């Protein structure tokens, strides 16, 4: 639109994008902490120490976390008889993993080109943008 020496332009955009995914594939996995005997290098079996068998879940997890914090790998920890004796991603007792999100963004702008002289033009403008679900 032209008004005298001014040429005005304006416009906008509105866009919505939907991301909808669902899967019943395994997620989170399952650790199983059964009865374990500590390796002979770690424990000498006696009646007093229950023949080096560890059963309380909290104690097994505590030992595993302590060993992980010292830099041992899970294979090292399991070789000592600590840690989970079974891990599987084949169990999905929690249901389906769903993601259903809509992202919306919009923008408005206005621009003015002012022809001050035949060889001088000043241009200026404003733009406003907004989006949702940005984290």
Image (tube, helix red, strand yellow):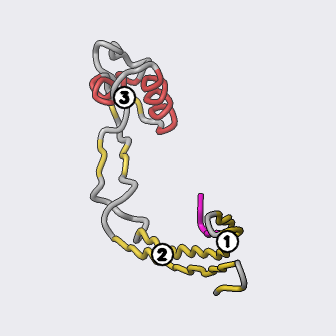
Whole-percent x, y for residue 33 in the image:
38, 41
Q: Tell me the element at label 2.
A: strand
Task: Check residue 14 for magenta coloring.
Answer: no
**Residue 116: percent from left, percent from top:** 71, 68
Q: Mark 2 points at which residue?
A: 100
Instruction: Specify the segment rendered in magenta.
Output: 128-135
User: Spatial distance from mark 2 to mark 3, Cα to Cα?
Assistant: 40 Å
Location of residue 74 in the rendering, given as x and y in whole percent from the top left corner: 33, 30
Question: Viewed as shown, does residue 127 lie left or right of 101?
Answer: right
Q: Which of marks 2 and 1 is in front?
A: 1
First in sequence: mark 1 vs mark 3: 3
Sequence-first disc among 2 and 3: 3
| CA distance for labels 1 and 3 | 80 Å
Mark 1 touching mark 3, by CB under 8 A? no
Secondary structure under badge 1? strand
In the rendered image, which residue does mark 1 sit on? Answer: 115
Residue annotated with mark 3: 82
Residue 13 image point, x, y percent: 56, 79
Q: Is residue 36 above or below residue 109?
A: above
Callout 2 crowding tier (Cα within 10 Å): few <14, some 14–19, many ≥20:
few
Q: Please name whichever residue, 102 or 57, is drawn nearer the observer in this view of the structure.
A: 102
Residue visible at 36% across and 28% down in the picture:
82
Q: Counting residues from the N terminus, which is met first, the one under dot 2 or under dot 1?
A: 2
Res 14 → quadrant: bottom right
Give the structural element (helix, strand or loop) at label 3: loop
Dot 1 surroundings within 10 Å: few (below 14), some, or many (20 or more)?
Answer: some
Q: Quadrant of the N terminus?
A: bottom right
Q: In which quarter of the image is residue 35?
A: top left
Residue at figure coordinates x 72%, y 84% from the top left: 4
């Amino acid at each position: 639109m032209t008004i005298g020496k001014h040429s005005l332009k304006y416009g906008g955009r509105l866009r919505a994008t939907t991301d909808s995914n669902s899967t019943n594939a395994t997620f989170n996995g399952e650790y199983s902490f059964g009865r374990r005997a500590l390796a002979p290098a770690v424990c000498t079996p006696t009646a007093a120490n229950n023949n080096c068998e560890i059963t309380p879940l909290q104690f097994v997890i505590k030992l595993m976390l302590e060993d992980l914090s010292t830099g041992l790998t899970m294979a090292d920890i399991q070789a000592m008889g600590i840690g989970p004796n079974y891990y599987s991603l084949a169990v999905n007792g929690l249901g389906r993993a769903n993601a259903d999100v809509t992202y919306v963004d919009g923008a408005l702008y206005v621009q003015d080109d002012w022809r001050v002289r035949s060889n001088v033009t000043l241009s200026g403008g404003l733009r406003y943008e907004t989006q949702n679900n940005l984290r």
